[in-house]
Amino acid sequence: MARPLLIVGDVQGDAERLASALEPYPQDGVDTVFVGDFFQGGPPGEAGGATAARIARGRRNAQSVLGNHDLLLLCVLEEVRTGWTPPTVLDTGRASLADIWLWRRGDWADLREVAEDAQLEAWLRELPLMLRLTDGTLVQHCDDDAYARLGATVEDVNARAREMLATPRGAWDVFWYTVGRRTFHNEQRLDAHLDHFAATRVVHGHTPHHSDRPVASHGGRIWSFDGCFSRYWARHGDDGAGPIEATVGLLPDL
């Protein structure tokens, strides 16, 4: 029999809460899909994003996609290694991409962990941007249709992204395909996106839904799993975090 499908939305560095959230779901009792954004938003100095990524990497029967914050960490890592700062960053008046990343709750400890763990960095760079599950469910990080510009199929999109990530400055180019929001409020664009990838529904994170459970819309053709999981992301601390069940939960069958 097929295992139930557990979706894990944006963790944003709160690895301790992630470990607790997974306890009710044994690794061999469910298939698990992480929708990305392991990094940015954990307790400062504790490398919570790297720990969360390692939990996902080591979990049996699990798959993951890349989120924009995961890609941004790779961009900052390249900046630190090479000294190249995207010109658009300099146009904002910031001295570096790292400045923006730190302001948005980046953690130098995460950067060091990834820089010193070649296998973890390679795992991140090999992650797909999208997954198409056997029931036609499309898993992607953000609720936007920019992914379709990378290819005609999920396989094409992922191959193109991996190719870009293997080249200098490629992470910065891929990053911009993962930042759009609320595109699928427009049902015609949702229909076109589903048709493009021969999919039945989209599961995503990225855009907080502020509800007690993952939110379905358009008759269940969209599922949002970003329930403000990290207790460290909001400026006012724990009060800004949603319940675990808003981000981590079983996806109903079609």
Image: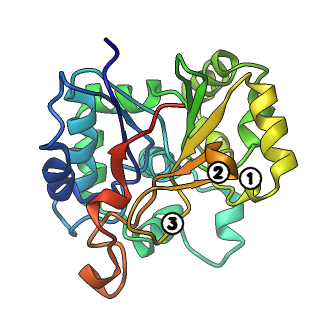
Tell me if residue 113 comes above or below residue 131 in the rendering. below
Mark 2 = which residue? 143
Q: Position of residue 135 (x, y in %)?
A: 55, 20
Q: Which residue is situated farthest in the bottom direction here?
A: 236
- Residue drawn 67% across and 24% down? 157
- Residue drawn 60% across and 49% down? 142
Around disc 3, counting alpha carbons within 10 Å, would you say few (fewer than 14), some (14 to 19), or many (20 or more)?
many
Q: Position of residue 68 (x, y in %)?
A: 53, 50
Which amino acid type is shown beneath numbered disc 3? Pro
Q: Are marks 3 and 2 in contact (CB under 8 Å)?
A: no
Tell me if residue 211 comes above or below residue 190 in the rendering. below
30, 66: nearer the viewer: 30
Mark 1 = which residue? 184
Residues under labels 2 and 1: Cα distance? Answer: 6 Å
Quarter holding residue 40: bottom left
Residues under labels 3 and 2: Cα distance? Answer: 11 Å
Around disc 2, counting alpha carbons within 10 Å, would you say few (fewer than 14), some (14 to 19), or many (20 or more)?
many
Q: Earlier in the sequence, mark 3 or mark 2?
A: 2
Q: Position of residue 128 (x, y in %)?
A: 52, 27
Q: Count of labels shown?
A: 3
Q: Which residue is situated farthest in the top direction here?
A: 1
Q: Are marks 1 and 3 in contact (CB under 8 Å)?
A: no
Mark 3 = which residue? 208
Q: Are marks 2 and 1 in contact (CB under 8 Å)?
A: yes
Residue 47 in view in this figure: no
